[in-house]
Image (tube, helix red, strand yellow):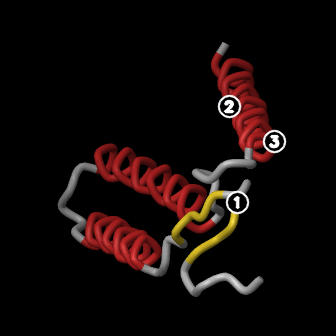
């Protein structure tokens, strides 16, 4: 049987499709984060350390937006990719900490 536009059948229950609203909001938010990052770098009168911290925070925000909205990690059934990403982040963080420890000890 054909389903009406905008609904999805899942486990016998109908669920409304998200539509483009959340994607447009995520896209606009990504653009705003990018513009803030460019403006912080272009305004050369800001403290360098503050700009670096701001850029890292903006990058983390961009990654979260990409994962949640574009990669659909907020949906059900994505446990294994989330575990893989968390394990990869743990290994990368451990490598950075160990490299810093090795250089400065």
Most foreground residue, 23 or 52: 23
| Residue where numbered disc 3 is placed | 80
The label nearer to you, 2 versus 1, is 1
- Left or right, residue 86 beside residue 17: right
Regarding mark 2 in the picture, which secondary structure is present there? helix
User: Do residues under tags 2 and 1 come within 8 Å of each other at their CB atoms?
Assistant: no
Q: Quadrant of residue 24?
A: bottom left
Residue at the farthest top position: 105
Residue at image point 32% right, 53% down? 51
| Residue where numbered disc 2 is placed | 93
Instruction: Using the numbered discs, state the Cα–Cα distance from disc 3 to disc 2 in whole angstroms.
Output: 20 Å
The correct choice, above or below, for 81 with respect to 18 in the image is above
Q: Residue 12 appears at what percent x and percent y?
A: 70, 57
The label nearer to you, 3 versus 2, is 3
Q: Residue 50 appears at what percent x and percent y?
A: 29, 46
Q: Does label 2 or label 1 sit earlier along the sequence?
A: 1
Q: Quadrant of residue 43?
A: bottom left
Regarding mark 3 in the picture, which secondary structure is present there? helix
Most foreground residue, 81 or 98: 81
Instruction: Using the numbered discs, state the Cα–Cα distance from disc 1 to disc 3 in whole angstroms.
Output: 20 Å
Q: Residue 30 appears at what percent x and percent y?
A: 41, 70
| Residue where numbered disc 1 is placed | 10
Residue at image point 73% right, 25% down? 94
Residue at image point 54% right, 81% down? 6
Most foreground residue, 98 or 56: 56
The correct choice, above or below, for 6 with respect to 39 in the image is below
Q: Does label 1 or label 3 sit earlier along the sequence?
A: 1
User: Do residues under tags 3 and 2 come within 8 Å of each other at their CB atoms?
Assistant: no
Instruction: Using the numbered discs, state the Cα–Cα distance from disc 2 to disc 1 in whole angstroms.
Output: 38 Å
Q: Quadrant of residue 97?
A: top right
């Amino acid at each position: 049987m054909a389903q009406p536009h905008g609904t999805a059948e899942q486990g016998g229950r109908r669920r409304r499709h998200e539509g483009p609203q959340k994607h447009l909001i995520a896209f606009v938010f990504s653009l705003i984060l990018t513009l803030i990052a460019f403006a912080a770098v272009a305004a050369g009168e800001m403290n360098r350390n503050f700009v670096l911290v701001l850029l890292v925070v903006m990058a983390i925000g961009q990654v979260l937006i990409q994962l949640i909205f574009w990669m659909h990690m907020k949906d059900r059934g994505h446990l294994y990719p989330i575990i893989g990403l968390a394990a990869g982040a743990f290994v990368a963080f451990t490598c950075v900490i160990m490299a810093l420890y090795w250089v400065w000890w």
